[in-house]
Image (tube, rainbow, N blue to C red):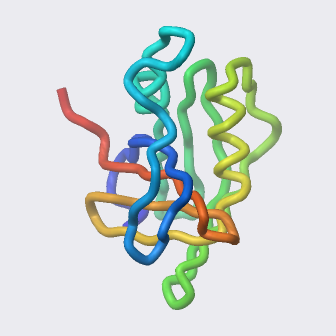
Amino acid sequence: IFVSGTWHVVNYFGKANWDKRNGDPKYKPVDAAGRNALNIIQSFTLIFNVDGSFTGKMQNSNFKGKWQADGKDRTLHLQIEGNPSTSSSYDREFIETLRNVVFYQGDSNVLLLAPEDKKSYIQFGHQKED
């Protein structure tokens, strides 16, 4: 699942039913301040490498780290190296969400990452080709 190309953020979901893969999307195309929040977060990416490293891209910076997954219990540990520059609220939310990931599920098209309580998740899809 992981080492299969570039994953881009689709949206964050709350009030989630982890087993049914549904929840309430957090971001709409235009937020209360008139920004296209969905376009901003959908530009965020992760690339998982075979050697257990990963790279990520946010609105204002890039970051890297190590990853380890367990297919039996569907756990995922992401260790982000250093303190990436998080000059926007979207960047801060992305890093914080990734630091809290405990579980994953998905296939070659969709990747869901959730914290311990599984009441929310972040959804990724494969990088859109232009």
Quadrant, the C terminus: top left
Residue 20, image quadrant: bottom left
Is residue 85 rendered to the left or right of residue 112? Answer: right
- The residue lying furthest to the top in this view is 34
Residue 116 lies, in percent from the top left, at: 69, 71
Point 41% across, 50% down: residue:
124
Is residue 39 rendered to the left or right of residue 69? Answer: left
Q: Nearer the viewer, residue 76 or 105?
A: 105
Point 42% across, 18% down: residue:
30
Point 67% across, 50% down: residue:
65
Q: Nearer the viewer, residue 95 or 36?
A: 36
Q: In this rendering, is residue 92 above or below 60? A: below
Quadrant, the N terminus: bottom left
Point 65% across, 36% down: residue:
63
Q: In this rendering, is residue 68 above or below 38? A: below
Residue 56 lies, in percent from the top left, at: 55, 39
- The residue lying furthest to the bottom in this view is 72
- The residue lying furthest to the right in this view is 82
Residue 82, image quadrant: top right
